Image (cartoon, grey):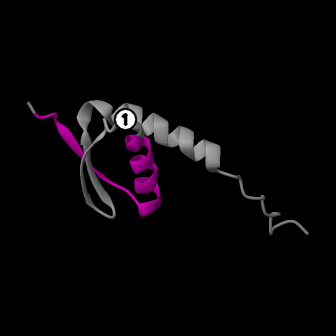
Amino acid sequence: MRAAGVLITCDPAIKSIIMQIDSEKHDIIIEDLDETHLFVKENMVQELKKKVEERLKETHTPEETLPDSDKE
């Protein structure tokens, strides 16, 4: 029996994160289609979103805020 799947379109950087997450257990990706598309197990989509958000929070450094140009 084959798992139902969902096509995900993302940029290569996000795809790389998804590939890293999948490499831990090989339980998410059904097929790697090209540099911006993956076919993943439908029942893993919500968990995958959560894991990607966690990874992004771990690696994201907020940029400095720029001064308002209206103020002098």
Q: Is residue 33 left or right of residue 15?
A: left
Q: Please, is residue 24 above or below residue 34 in the view?
A: above
Question: Circle 1 is placed at which residue position?
Answer: 25
Q: Name the residue: 83% across, 63% down.
A: 67
| Element assignment for label 1 | helix
Return the residue found at the far right: 72
Q: Please, is residue 47 above or below residue 9 in the view?
A: above
Measured from the top left, where is residue 60 in percent x and y? Answer: 64, 50
Q: Residues within 10 Å of mark 1 (few under 14, many from 20)?
A: few
Segment tinted magenta in the rendering: 2-23
Q: Please, is residue 19 above or below residue 11 in the view?
A: above
Label 1 is placed on what type of residue? Lys
Return the residue found at the far left: 1
Q: Is residue 63 left or right of residue 7?
A: right
Q: Name the residue: 87% across, 65% down.
A: 71
Quarter of the figure with the N terminus: top left
